[in-house]
Image: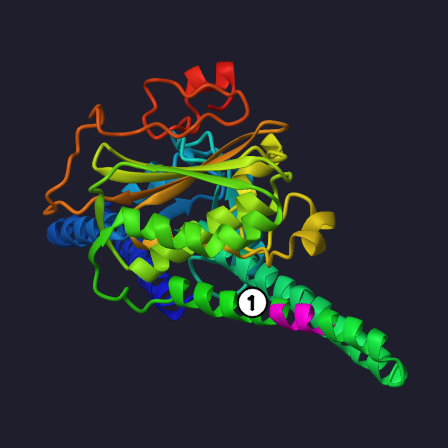
Amino acid sequence: MEPLLALMAGLVIGLLLALTVVRARYRPVDEGGSGLRAAAFEPRVDSDAALSRRLVDLMDPAVVLVGPDDAVLLANPSARALGILRGDRLLVPGLLEVARNVQVSGSRRADVALPGDLVGTGPRMVGVHGIRLGSGPVVAPGPVALVLTDVTEARRVEAVRRDFVANVGHELKTPVGALALLAEAVQGAADDPETVQRFAARMSHEADRLARLVRELIDLSRLQGAEPLPELVPVAVGTVVAEAVDRTRAAAAAKDIQLAVAAQPGLVVRGVEAQLATALTNLLANAVAYSPPGTTIAVGARARSGFAEIAVTDSGIGIPRSDRSRVFERFYRVDQSRASSTGGTGLGLAIVKHVASNHGGAVTVWSEEGLGSTFTLRIPMATDADQPVDDDGPERPPVPPLHGRQTPDDDPAGVAQPNAPENMEKGRS
């Protein structure tokens, strides 16, 4: 538990303990003429109790005081907002288990999973710090204070970090190992110039792959870092599209893939041109890598609801439904067996995701196995730019249809929007 949280837990528990002691010491019971003394203390007791309860209610962490019979004696608004209570009972067995263990051990820290149906926000993970009020050996069961804090994101980040380290090691090992083997082979074929030349070409390929991996790791690290973006300036979407298409043209030509471009003129966003061009280049490179030879990749750009939408549509192998939510994860590949043949690092789409997020936008995917995929990059438009923003403007040329798939009239960019019901019925357009 973080030091600040531990301090907060101590403060909460101290307040609850003080409230319990004060109430027990100055209980207004009139025995042997002590009624006047008890009555004199009542205002101060009430004031202390109200102040203690107010401070507990203002705490960000959820605080629950559980009695010996598992009944909830006190819960602040943060605890009730988690949906873990019904009346004076805890609904989560894991929390009850922690409270009962604390009765015996005196203190415990644990992570407890909260079901997503409690508050309707999906499954959550809370860190629980439980402390028994009082000290010394347990003579009789007493109340237990549970302090809960949401650690869902922290645990997710920890898992991502572990996976990242493991994946980096694996991805670096492949080209480094290949280079070592090729170097050994070159030494053994020193008297055969043709073999040396062939191995040298392979070494160059692996070195390029290693350099690309390191470069993309650095790019991704910068995008995910805390340092602010460079100053955002007006960027013409047409310029970004032209740059990305130019970077991808050679790879597309090598597979006899046509690049069809239809961008609404005059679109301007605020951003970093180099990052946006890199993101779109990654989308195009991904489309080229997973499209069969002789097909067409369409690039469309349009204004829609205050965003510039740049869509890349291919006729590739498509993405299985079970993998679509993970394609933007670092090093994730739908088909690991194709990694060496496509030459990708597994970081391209993760970079696209972070570029879009850092610009206040998003990237989405629509895909169907056997039909292909549409990746749509949405970036907020520059509000002070003199540009058309009407989604139904006649100036937008449609993207040529791909392999017999018709371009709908209501989709000026020539690509179906992800998750659109009308497009799911008739296939991607």
Residue occupying image coordinates x 22% and y 29%? 395
Residue 387 in magenta stretch? no
Q: Position of 16 compared to 298: left or right?
A: left
Read off the residue under disc 1: 212
Residue 205 picture location, percent across and down: 67, 68
Mark 1 is surrounded, within 10 Å at the Cα level, by few (under 14), some (14 to 19) or many (20 or more) other residues, namely: some
Residue occupying image coordinates x 39% and y 70%? 3
Q: How many marks?
A: 1
Residue occupying image coordinates x 13% and y 54%? 44
Determine whether the residue tagged by mark 1 lies in a helix, strand or loop: helix
* Colouring convention used in this rendered image of the protein: rainbow
Residue occupying image coordinates x 52% and y 58%? 109
Residue 324 to residue 184: above or below: above
Is residue 77 visible to the viewer in this orientation of the structure? yes
Start and end of the magenta stretch? Answer: 203-208
Q: Main secondary structure of the magenta part?
A: helix
Residue 84 to residue 65: above or below: above
Is residue 129 visible to the viewer in this orientation of the structure? no
Taking depth in this image into account, of 263 and 271 the one nearest to the observer is 263
Residue 190 to residue 100: above or below: below
Residue 47 picture location, percent across and down: 14, 52
Q: Amino acid at mark 1?
A: Arg
Taking depth in this image into account, of 169 and 137 the one nearest to the observer is 169
Q: Position of 15 compared to 213: left or right?
A: left
Residue 182 to residue 164: above or below: below
